[in-house]
Image (spheres, rainbow, N blue to C red):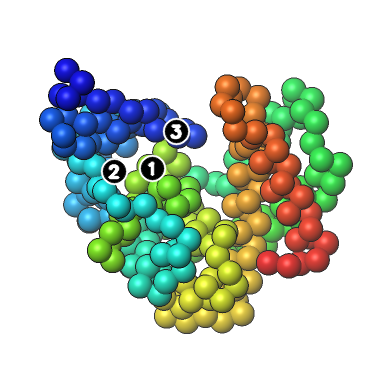
Amino acid sequence: MKNILKITPINSLNNSTYNITIFHKKYFLKVTKRNNTKLIKLLEDKDITPKGIFTSKKILFNKYISNANLDEKLQNTETFLKSISSELKKLHSISINTYNNPFEKIKNNFSHLEKINFSLPPYTKFIIHKLNLLEEELSKDINLGLCHNDLNPSNILYKNNKVYLVDFDFIGMNDIYYDLATLSWFLSKDIRKKLLFFYFGDCTSYHVDKLNKYIFIAKLWNATWSYNKSIVSNSDYNYRLGGDLIMEDLYNYISKNTY
């Protein structure tokens, strides 16, 4: 039986995922928290995500795509930036009735943390003030589209110059700059400018400024998510420390405006 079936759990922050080997053929199984069956089918038809072998309300079963992990070196190539820009423009052109408001989610996260008397960094009030200023400003200039909302490298497959997006637990309508910001988090300033150029066909001070503001928002959402995750997680990963490091980075940004 060992040669017939092998199931290996994969570390995942939001859902249960497994690599499965059956008669030496590899597959990928994911148990999700949301029923995105119709949306996943639409994304498959548009070649934004790999076609599944089997999809039910909360289960995805796909062929395993080998050697498709995105690393730092690949992420900085023009070939990848062009490919991811093309796929994101396809995704962002879609419209659905589900919305993902990062400002609302961040405030809800902070509210929950305050209710349980979670110890936040002493400079948190300055970060929240900055959040409120950005919400007032950015709510007047929204580029709305269907966003992945969690574009970290583990949710991007890249092989033969083709990008596929996976893991759509946070998908919803949002400002498209949120996706660009999440993708830009660990990119250098020069590479971020290239990404903006390949996506918009131009890169002005307006594009750079708005991207930087959404990088702040994306980081703050991740910090508050990490804090809340630290309360319930049994993982060896230190979510509390992760949140603290991001908050310190954001405070330095406010102080020095360094993005």
Of the image marks 2 and 3, the number of the one nearer the N terminus: 3
Q: How crowded is mark 2: few (under 14 residues within 10 Å), some or many (20 or more)?
A: few
Q: Mark 3 — residue?
A: 11
Query: Can residue 251 be seen at all in this image of the molecule?
Result: yes
The answer to whether residue 95 is visible is no
Q: Nearer the viewer, residue 115 or 138?
A: 115
Calculate the distance from the C-alpha at mark 2 to the C-alpha at mark 3.
25 Å
Find numbered disc 2 in the image and state the secondary structure of the residue it sits on.
helix
Type of residue at label 1? Phe
Counting from the top left corner in percent of width and height, residue 226 is at 63, 37
In the picture of the structure, the residue carrying the numbered disc 2 is: 39
The amino acid marked with disc number 3 is Asn
In the picture shown, does residue 85 fall above or below 159?
Answer: below
Residue depicted at x 75% and y 61%: 253
Q: Which residue is drawn at 47% across and 82% down?
A: 202
Q: Are marks 2 and 1 in contact (CB under 8 Å)?
A: yes
